[in-house]
Image: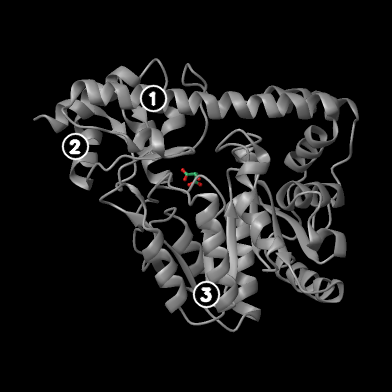
Amino acid sequence: FWSGVEMGPPDNIFGLVEAFKNSTHPNKVNLAMGAYRDEYGNPYVLNCIKKAEKIILDRNLDKEYAGMSGFADFCADAAKLTFGEDSPGLSDGRIATVQSISGTGSLYLASTFFAKFYPHKVVYHSNQTWGNHAQVFKSAGLEANTYTYYDKSTCGLNADGMLKDLRELPSGSIILLHASAHNPTGVDPTQQQWRDIGKVLKEKGHLPFIDMAYQGFATGDLDRDAFAVRLLEREGLQPVVTQSCAKNLGLYGERTGALHVVTASKEEKDRVMSQIKILIRPTYSNPPIHGARLAVEVWRNKDLYKEWLAELKIMSGRISDMRKALQLGLETNTNRKWPHITRQIGMFCYSGLETDQVTLLREEHAIFMTKDGRISMVSLSNNNIEYVVNCISKLLIM
Ligand code: LMR
């Protein structure tokens, strides 16, 4: 049956994780995958989640279906967390929210919705963006194209280039934005730059499609990391937001997240909601229940919520400590300045290493990172930072 099936290429992130697992190098380091590790390099289950898990277990709950749109409590809380308590769309009942399959599943669901109902079939994303974005859009039947974003010469944002591109795109274009902690560059617009972006989006009638994977994880502050989403919504734009609980609640494999579509009226919301459910039913039918129960427990239990906020600070704080250590180590060992390491934010450092250097690091030192030179900061720890610094430095002063 399958003799004509050709071998496909490995995934640009998970393929490296598999290669890392297969490596027998004693010092191997996985800097490819964005999944938080503690200071000893071990996967980290948040304490608030462990406690929520016990509470839920004691309740002896059933395993019934959540319903196509997921748990109502989860959707309500997820929307509040995203848009803020005083969101105009929430108070008008204009936001269609469904619990979906973490960030990727929500992006795919939104894309299938656009493919079916939106007149424009191109998603414009920043150049660079997360390695999975374009393939999600394409597999949902959309095209993927880019707008200017990253400035290689400053390792920062090319704000003028971005605004110019947004102005020149056809009115009503779908513009993919990263709410905070831009992946892979770690370069976010300032609040003033977000205002400028919002102005152009509004003038051009573009549709903001916001990927929010790092709320609370970027700065340790849930409100600050949701600034862009809330600003655009309050400016009267109608963003479509994909929300992931993978990073901020550490629910990676539980696939917990939501899709929010801000609409013009309650009646429009009901229609949008009905069609999203129609897209869900033949694909995954109902979202997974365990992660959503955990999230709601943490969000509604005062003690657990407090502990969560503290753990967000611990995680984002450890990342910023590792940034400082990496910068210091590289500046000490190479005759270069590495200010962008601490200027960037979030899970990743866009190091500036070239593809051939990345290949050498992998082949000779078993240091795995994506070919664009993205370093997963969360995988650096006191156990491996010296090794990583030494190997990169050796390579650069060769
Ligand atoms: C990453 O960028 O490494 C993470 O978001 C994990 C993933 O799904 O790619």
Compared with 100, 386 (above or below) is above
Q: Which residue is mark 1?
A: 324
Which of the two labelled residues, at mark 1 and mark 3, occupies the earlier sequence position? 3
Q: Which residue is mark 2?
A: 360
Q: Amino acid at mark 1?
A: Lys
Q: Amino acid at mark 3?
A: Gly
Q: Nearer the viewer, residue 17 or 155?
A: 155
For the residues bearing labels 2 and 1, Cβ distance under 8 angstroms = no
Q: CA distance from mark 2 to mark 1?
A: 24 Å
Residue 188: percent from left, percent from top: 47, 49
Compared with 294, 241 (above or below) is below
Q: Is residue 394 visible?
A: yes
Left or right of residue 184, residue 363 in this image = left
For the residues bearing labels 3 and 2, Cβ distance under 8 angstroms = no
The type of colouring in the image is: one colour
Is ligand 1 within 8 Å of the beta carbon of the residue shown at mark 3? no
Q: Which mark is residue 141?
A: 3
Residue depicted at x 31% and y 39%: 351
Residue depicted at x 86% and y 59%: 91
Compared with 131, 33 (above or below) is above
Mark 3 element type: loop
Left or right of residue 79, residue 60 in this image = right
Residue 78: percent from left, percent from top: 76, 48
Q: Nearer the viewer, mark 1 or mark 3?
A: 1
**Tag 2: Cα neighbours inside 10 Å, few (<14), some, or many (≥20)?**
some
**Tag 1: Cα neighbours inside 10 Å, few (<14), some, or many (≥20)?**
some
Mark 2 element type: helix
Q: Which mark is residue 1?
A: none
Q: Nearer the viewer, residue 115 or 353?
A: 353
Which of the two labelled residues, at mark 2 and mark 1, occupies the earlier sequence position? 1
Q: Nearer the viewer, mark 2 or mark 1?
A: 1
Residue 213: percent from left, percent from top: 58, 47
